[in-house]
Image: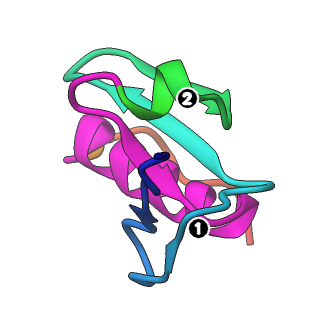
Amino acid sequence: MTTLQEFRCEVCGIVTGNPTHWFVIQCGNSELTVHRWNSEAANAAGARHYCGEAHAEVYISRWFDSVCAPPKPNFGRASPAQ
């Protein structure tokens, strides 16, 4: 008997047992790796699942914001002419 494994998108919450065109993201504080869907990556500890490119991009953008925030100070550089 086969067991059906389901996955939930981290952004919209949709659940599927057939994650065609899904992405897996593995990340830490200083590294983020995006994988096309494969069972090994999907079942790895800490893996995050996304139902498509757009939702993977949402997570990546949020990750960059958290890593790159707050912005570097300007230190009095002149702003470009308007």
Under circle 1, the secondary element is: helix
Q: Residue at x 48, y 83 (%)?
A: 14
Neighbor class of circle 1 (other Cα within 10 Å; few <14, some 14-19, many 20+) is some
Q: Quadrant of the C terminus?
A: bottom right
Verify CB contact (< 8 Å) between mark 2 and mark 1. Answer: no
Residue found farthest to the front? 1
Tell which tag, 2 or 1, sits nearer the viewer.
Answer: 2
Q: Is residue 69 above or below residue 56?
A: above
Q: In the figure, 26 relative to 7: above or below?
A: above
Q: Which residue is mark 2?
A: 39
Q: Is residue 58 left or right of residue 11?
A: right
Q: Amino acid at mark 1?
A: His
Which element is circle 2 on? helix
Residue labelled with disc 1: 55
Residue 24: where, in percent of width, then height?
53, 39
Q: Nearer the viewer, residue 66 or 76?
A: 66
Which kind of residue does numbered mark 2 sit on? Ser
Q: Give the image's coloring scheme.
A: rainbow
Pinpoint residue 47: horizontal percent, then vertical percent.
Answer: 34, 35
Of 45 and 27, which appears nearest the observer?
45
Pick whichever of labels 2 and 1 is earlier in the sequence.
2
Q: Is residue 75 visible?
A: no
The magenta stretch spans residue 57: yes
- What range is drawn magenta here? 44-70
Picture residue at 47% right of the left edge, 36% below the top: 25
